[in-house]
Amino acid sequence: MNSPEPYRPALHFSPRSGWTNDPNGLIQVDGIWHIFYQHEPHSTVHGPMHWGHASSPDLTTWIEHPIALYPDALGTCFSGSAIETPSGEVKLFYTAHRARPDGSDFQVQCLVHADRGLTRFTPDQHNPIVGNPGLLVFRDPKVFWHAQTQRWIMVVTHGQSIGIRSSTDLVHWELESTFGEHDGQHGDGPWECPDLFPLQAPDGTTHWVLMVGIGSDSYGGGSGTQYFIGAFDGHSFVNGNRPETVLWADHGRDYYAAQSFFGAERPTTIAWASNWQYAHNVPTTAFRGVMTLPRELSLIDSQYG
């Protein structure tokens, strides 16, 4: 008997139905891996974004859960991240997106409180916790704890650069710096879904890796993921290579908006296995969009001629 969904993958996560793109809120809690994702449950084309939710004990077998975040008065739910506080509380951060009267985008950052089972989600009373500073593209907050300065750090898209903010209470945020105006690959589309985390080199030294989705003009064509290796002191990221150096996390065409899991023992990422050049044209019927297989990241020594 022919499968009604011959293109549904066996190992890559895909939703039962509807559209999906960027992975959001990747976190490991009590041994369970959770992914949220950009989701339009009512259509197989991109539309009003919700956060879908799935979990796995092993990053191979996935259980799809009810939708976690719905559009509200602040807008639809664009990409973001998840963290666990030292006291065991789980928080989600996302971009609320809506259109201005002239049709242009307006985006702010929001906080949601979750239970440890990630079954209940309550928006913070202070939302939006970060207002728009006058940017057309201001989205995709990735939050993590910086032990050296004892503060939470948020990296967020500023269009063709990345803003770095800090907070002690997850509600009040201060701009520390920006990075990328003159570094790496720039195309017609914005930089998206930033992520910043430390990795240890073979010689024992620690380096910080900043990953950025680039909406167009990537190595494989269309959208892709580039990265920078450098230093981060809790205030600013310093590129360890020349500004014109371009490093790609994948040289194919289906690795976009990569994000790492908060709480994982080793840096582990999942990305969207598609490309904005053809994402709406894949031959599935009940759903569109799948996630990549997970990757554990490490640094190696290499020489480029």
Image (tube, rainbow, N blue to C red):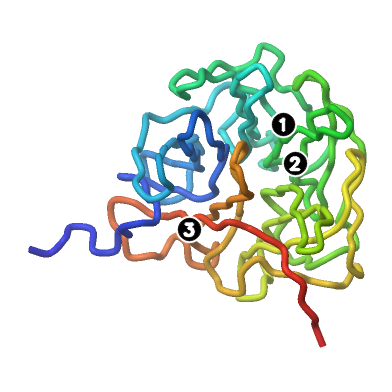
Disc 1 on helix, strand or loop?
strand
Q: Nearer the viewer, residue 87 or 20?
A: 87
SS for dot 3: loop
**CA separation in Å, label 3 and label 1:** 28 Å
How packed is label 2: few (under 14 Cα within 10 Å), some, or many (20 or more)? many
Q: Which residue is mark 2?
A: 138
Residue 140 vertical position relative to residue 88 in the rendered view, above or below? below
Q: Locate the C terminus by quadrant.
A: bottom right
3 vs 2, front mark: 3
Is disc 3 surrounded by few (<14), some (14 to 19) or many (20+) residues within 10 Å?
Answer: many
Q: Please state which amino acid type lies under the numbered disc 1.
A: Val
**2 or 1: tag closer to the N-terminus:** 1
Disc 2 marks a residue whose amino acid type is Phe
Q: Is residue 114 left or right of residue 174?
A: left
Q: Do the residues under discs 3 and 2 have CB atoms within 8 angstroms? A: no
Residue occupying the far left of the picture: 1
**Where is residue 88 shown, x and y percent of the image?**
61, 19
Please tell me which residue is depicted at 72% across the width and 31% down the height of the picture. Answer: 108
Q: Give the quadrant of residue 133.
A: top right
Residue that numbered label 1 is attached to? 108
Q: Is residue 264 left or right of residue 202?
A: left
Secondary structure type for disc 2: loop
Vertical arrangement, residue 160 with respect to residue 151, above or below? below
- Is residue 98 shown left or right of residue 234? left
